[in-house]
Image (cartoon, rainbow, N blue to C red):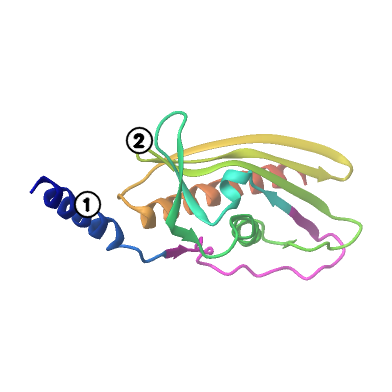
Amino acid sequence: MKKWLTVIAALALSACSSSDDGKTYYQLPQSSMPAMQAASQPGTHLLWVEQVAVPDYLAGNGVVYQTSDVQFVIATSNLWASPLDQQLRNTLVSNLSSALPGWVVASQPLGNDQDILNVNVTGFHGRYDGKVIVSGEWLLNHQGQLIKRPFHLELKQQEDGYDAMVKTLAQAWQQEAQSIASQLTRLN
């Protein structure tokens, strides 16, 4: 009798765990307003977003969630629709384009007289306390001068779940793009 109870319990548990084996894919939303790019004319500011790098734990397909101060879980059913570094770079170009009217911002080289931006993202995940973390540093080559700035944003999710987490991560990333844009406008 005890054997049957054990078998039934095991079957019930396995049915619960396998009932939701569908995968969900996430893409960071683009900024709502498409930016008008300035034509490259004399005096136009050019910015090449050369690279957005992420560490190995963020480079996989799974969305990352921090469960304690030292533990991270990489989701197996909640996945990025395309590589995270590409999504971050594309949305950064889009967000900077919107925030920098009169600039040409691109993910490809624009010529000899351009600023070059590289970003190293060290945190882009949800956390056990209901916040998302977006952190790292960026390096700008502005007319031969190197400018390096760290960033660390923590935003509270308004709802539970991966959808809300991805939307809040995108909001934090957009805020960092605004901060980068403010720094760039002060330089020129």
The local crowd at label 2, few if under 14, some if 14 to 19, many if 20 or more residues have their Cα within 10 Å, is: few
Chain part drawn in magenta: 24-50
Q: According to the image, label 1 marks what residue? A: 10
Q: How far across and how far down the image is residue 111, in percent? A: 89, 62
At x 73% / y 68%, what residue is drawn? Answer: 38
Q: How far across and how far down the image is residue 122, in percent? A: 60, 39
Marks 2 & 1, CB-CB < 8 Å contact: no
Kindly state the secondary structure of the residue where label 2 is placed: loop
Kindly state the secondary structure of the residue where label 1 is placed: helix
Q: Is residue 20 left or right of residue 186?
A: left
At x 58% / y 56%, what residue is drawn? Answer: 84
At x 38% / y 57%, what residue is drawn? Answer: 163
Q: According to the image, label 2 marks what residue? A: 129
Quarter of the rendering containing residue 88: bottom right
Quarter of the rendering containing residue 35: bottom right
Q: What's under tag 1, amino acid-wise? A: Ala
Cα separation between marks 2 and 1: 32 Å
Q: Answer whether residue 41 is magenta in the image.
A: yes
**Nearer to us: label 2 or label 1:** 1
